[in-house]
């Protein structure tokens, strides 16, 4: 039997504990940023929690941008119907 590390989170309490630990870590890192002296190249980098705010904004842009691209570049569900291998007629499988 292969070991699957994700089975650890099958029980709801373990997943909840991991989520709470992650939230506590994020809050601690957010709070630590107020006490760290930054040596910045651009002035905007000196704003408190600039990197967390910038990261959240860029993450949101990527998610909503992908939705826009999906609507522009997406194909209908039956786009490959006639070209798909599983749509071919198989010999000897005629309806009786």
Image (cartoon, grey):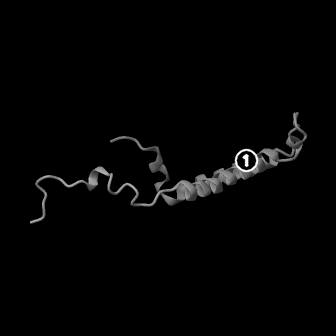
Q: Secondary structure at mark 1?
A: helix
Q: Is residue 29 left or right of residue 6?
A: right
Name the residue: 46% across, 55% down: 10
Q: Nearer the viewer, residue 10 or 72?
A: 72
Residue at 10% from the left image edge and 54% from the top image edge: 92
Quadrant where the N terminus lies?
top left
Point out the image quarter for the C terminus. Answer: bottom left
Q: Is residue 41 left or right of residue 51?
A: right
Q: Viewed as shown, does residue 23 lie left or right of 39?
A: left
Q: How many marks?
A: 1
Q: Residue furthest front?
A: 82
Of all residues shown, which one is farthest toward the bottom?
Answer: 96
Closer to the camera in the image, 75 or 15: 75
> Which x, y percent locates residue 65?
64, 54
Above or below, 36 relative to 84: above
Tell me: residue 41, above or below residue 89: above
**Percent x, y of residue 70:** 56, 56
- State the residue lying farthest toward the right: 43
Instruction: Give the image quarter of residue 95.
Output: bottom left
Residue 63, position as x, y percentages in the image: 63, 54
Local crowd size for mark 1, using a 10 Å CA cut-off: few (<14), some (14–19), many (≥20): few
Rendering quarter of residue 69: bottom right
Q: Which residue is mark 1?
A: 55
The x, y position of residue 36, in whole percent, is 86, 39
């Amino acid at each position: 039997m292969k070991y699957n590390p994700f089975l650890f989170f099958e029980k709801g309490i373990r997943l909840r504990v991991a989520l709470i630990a992650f939230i506590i870590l994020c809050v601690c890192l957010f709070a630590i940023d107020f006490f760290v002296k930054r040596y910045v190249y651009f002035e905007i980098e000196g704003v408190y929690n600039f990197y967390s705010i910038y990261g959240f904004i860029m993450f949101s842009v990527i998610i909503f941008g992908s939705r826009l691209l999906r609507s522009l570049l997406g194909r209908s569900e039956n786009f490959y119907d006639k070209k798909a291998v599983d749509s071919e007629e198989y010999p000897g499988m005629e309806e009786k």
